[in-house]
Image (cartoon, rainbow, N blue to C red):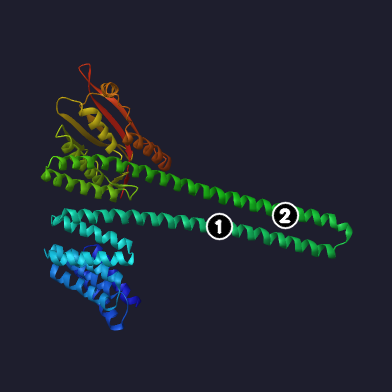
Amino acid sequence: MLISYSYNNIGSTLLEKKEFQEALEYFEISLDIKLRNSFTGVAATYNNMGLSYQEMDDYPKSRDFYKASYDYCHQNKDDYGIVTSAINLGVINHLMNNSAKAEKYFLEAYNIAFKNGYKKLIVEATEFAHDFFYDMGRYEQAYDMLKQYVIYSDSIQNDDVIKEIARLEAEFEYNQKQISDSIMYHQQKIHDEALHEEELKRKEQLIWILAVTFAFIVFIAFALFKAYQLRRKNRENQLKQQALEIEKNLLRSQMNPHFIFNAMNSIQSFIAENDSYSALRYLSKFAKLIRLILENSMHQNIQLQDELQSLELYMELEKVRFNNKFDFKINIDDKIESDIIEVPPMLIQPFVENAIIHGVMPLEKEGLIEINMRKIDGENLILCEVTDNGIGREASAALKKSHGKKHKSVGMQVSRQRLESLNKQTQKEMSYQVEDIVCDGKVCGTKVSIIIPFISEF
């Protein structure tokens, strides 16, 4: 059995390196051993071979191996394997433009996963089904699948948090019991030794024995107390780190509903105007952005190119929402490798939102927002500048006051809290500075300079 799994693992490694033909040779050897000896893992090897042919664009052979896995799982009443194989068959039939079969397999995968409570497979099935229905132009069904994807993604995250809390509580209780048992053991041992010494020693030796015994007890108690203090300090540090992580996740989750609310208002506006074409285009970009936000929110850091992609989508949506009242540019320094550098997600968007709402929207002319990024030499830091040709901070404040508005920007407040939280956790100085742009003695815009630390994959 170990030999068959070794061949399968070597094939998987070659598949990751895109050496597909060599991978198939190892998969075939592994499959032959498993079939001859009735070992487990046959369905997984079939799926690996199907994926290899899929990556080689040989869709018919890929479909045959996915179907072999599917049939094998049905014969062995393996519901989990059926769901995995059905998803693969849905994907390959979608690629081969067999929409009826693709739909059949996607729905079968979803239904079986839902019946058995396979949350992670429900997330996978709804993700691919959403893409399929969206490509078919069946937007209502695509939206239904997207909702299920969001619900079960959140559920999986909540389950993981609950399990981790339960594990930490159990570990803490176990450590407490160990300390208690150790103290009781030493106390009993000392007591027994004292009784034995009293029986053997003479009366004049009793004071000396008691003194030694007392000193020994004090020493043990002191050692145990110091060990407990050290353990408690380590535990407190762990809890503080976890608290900072939870705080950061909560702050990030506050940011997503803030933007989604504005985007939904835009879709509602198009529908109210009976502009179905614009509504569908807007909904398509909105769905893509929602997917990016959900994926990015699961990670502490993401590739800069992913952050820029979501930022560009957001600005395109806002541009449409405000009837092309402004244009935008994103300029990246050649020294910044956006596919390697990773940064915290959704840090820049609230500053862009502020520039749109309070900077360029009150203008009578067309607004312009520019995002410029450059690397600070000698440090793992990026300087991001968000500039606009808007009315400036003072005029914006006066305008809000004249209209009687008391609304405080939630996005800016959350960004400020996120920067403070990230500073505590990373021990790095992330900050931002806001200043007016002056032209011929008059304010002609606003510039926000943000210092963002990054990490590199290499």
423 with respect to 32 (left or right): right
Point out the tag, 1 or 2, that comes first from the N-terminus: 1
Task: Assign a secondary structure to mark 1.
Answer: helix
Q: Position of residue 132 (x, y in %)?
A: 17, 59
11 with respect to 228 (left or right): left
Q: Nearer the viewer, residue 168 or 437?
A: 168
Q: In 3D space, how far apart are the residues under numbered discs 1 and 2 (Cα atoms)?
A: 25 Å
Residue type, numbered disc 2 = Ile
In the displayed structure, 167 sits above or below 75; it is above
- Picture quadrant of residue 24: bottom left
Task: Assign a secondary structure to mark 2.
Answer: helix
> Can residue 57 be seen at all in this image of the molecule?
no
- Picture quadrant of residue 25: bottom left
Badges 1 and 2: C-beta atoms under 8 Å apart?
no
Q: Position of residue 32 (x, y in %)?
A: 25, 79
Check residue 173 in the rendering and tell me which mark sits there, or answer none.
Answer: 1
Residue shown at the point (26%, 76%) measured from the top left: 74
221 with respect to 97 (left or right): right
Name the residue beneath numbered marker 2.
217
424 with respect to 336 (left or right): right
